[in-house]
Amino acid sequence: TSDSCGGPGPVRANQGCQVHGVSSDTLVRLASGLYGAVLRSSAPWLGCVSEDAVDMTHRFRRDLAKSDAEAKMSKQKLQQRMKEQFQKAMGGMPSWAETKFKKKNKKKDDSDDSDEDGDDLMRKTGNFVGSSDSLPKGIIRMKKCLHANNDRPSKDRLTTVQFHPSAQVVMTAGIDQSISLFQVDGKTNPKIQSIHLERFPVHKAQFSVNGEQVVATSFRNKLFYIYDMMEGKVIPVHTVRGLREQRVKEFEVSPDGESLLLTGTSGYLHVLTMKTKEVVKSLKINGNVVGVAFSHDGSKVFTNSEEGEVYIWDMRSSKCLNRFTDDGCVSGTSMAASKNGQYLACGSAAGVVNVYSQEECMRQNNPKPLKAIMNLVNSATSLRFNPTSEILAIASRADDEAARLVHIPSFTVFSNFPMFQRKTIYRAHRLDFSPNSGFFSLANNKGHAPLFRLLHYKDF
């Protein structure tokens, strides 16, 4: 079986469009920021020997030197070298960073290209559904692509995979102390940039809502990093005013992009403003928090406790709107909310995933699940709805190949995923769909991000 999606050429973003408030000019600035991310960073791992010279023998820069004579290089020359490497990997300026004028000319040049499979994703990202037909149950049409991070696989397990909200880019991060960005074309998925965070194995990394920053946390301390891709800077956040936690691991970015919801110890949730990096309020549940999900509009937040208690909070007033026990759950593990505002999924240590109506969760003290999904044998550690709320991806990191795609609203699993007799998934640690569900990927314990093209969806 081929490991390539094939197709006529790179998947492209909408020509000259503005999606999620991100214009073509912004994407060009994003690309420019990525060129110099390491150079302009104030982080200590740069290893510069002076303000103007950079040590090229460092293991994270050796591949940029063309000969042993280039033991040192000026920042200006290194930035140019990085640009050359970037464009070589992309085959020129990437399509997601092209200006409207360039794209118009390129469209003319590419007019002879054809797509026998009808699989060019129609060059659009953003809140647009590619097909007016609902997703059929039973068998999901898909292709296995090269791994999303094939150009730079991790030497240790991945903890994060996430698609950019408005560009054809995917991010991976993991135990090897790095964050990497790749262009998603389904064929070669060239690397755009990697940054190394010294002594900082990444527990979780997540894009900001506007896609201009990445927030990254580790395992054993409360230091976290903001990777500003527009400025090309990696900013350490050593202290957060009002935060009395020994470590910061789990977090969620609010849908409006204004705040981070940090998961603390002893049942605490801390609301941190992105602008000032200070805690403005804290919420408290009984027991430990194991799952957090915002409602689609960010007005409410759902939390799942280790004891299987579900809490619903009003984000404006900080009041608990409702509380109930997840049906049949002894130990909760995870949570996800659908973007259409209809569904709430709660995972348990027994592998059962209960899917509820969000409306019923608000109204009843003892809501019954619409469906108890019992297709995992061990703990349901990862849950993710696709953007159209037609698929719920579920996985357990306790077993190889323990990942399933569940059709909504029939709540039946697609029989052809995982796809192959041989192992392709291994142990999944995090799951994500591209903005219009054209692609699905996961982070696994082998350092890979398997990538799948979902053919029902015509857009990235």
Image: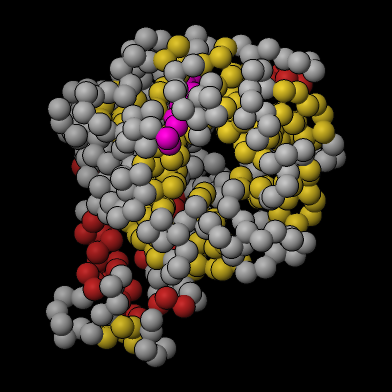
**Where residue 47 appears, x then y in whole percent?**
38, 81
**Where residue 370 appears, x then y in whole percent?**
61, 11
Using the image as rendered, state which of residue 6 and residue 431 is in the foreground. Answer: 431
Compared to residue 304, the image places residue 273 above or below, namely: below
Compared to residue 110, the image places residue 404 above or below, namely: above
Q: Residue at x 80, y 18 (%)?
A: 365
Image quarter hosting the C terminus: top left
Give the farthest residue toward the bottom. Answer: 50
**Where residue 115 appears, x then y in whole percent?**
21, 27
413 with respect to 452 (left or right) = right
67 with respect to 381 (left or right) = left
Q: Residue at x 73, y 39 (%)?
A: 287
Asked whether 168 falls inside the magenta stretch, the response is: no
Using the image as rendered, state which of residue 159 and residue 170 is in the foreground. Answer: 159
Residue 249 visible = yes
Q: Residue at x 44, y 32 (%)?
A: 396
Indicate the colouring scheme. secondary structure
Asked whether 394 falls inside the magenta stretch, the response is: yes
Compared to residue 13, the image places residue 353 above or below, namely: above
Residue 389 visible = no
| Extent of the magenta region | 388-398
Compared to residue 320, the image places residue 156 above or below, namely: below
Q: How many marks?
A: 0
Image quarter hosting the N terminus: top left
Determine the image quadrant of residue 197: bottom left
**Where residue 255 appears, x then y in whole percent?**
63, 40
110 with respect to 351 (left or right) = left
Q: Residue at x 45, y 22 (%)?
A: 376
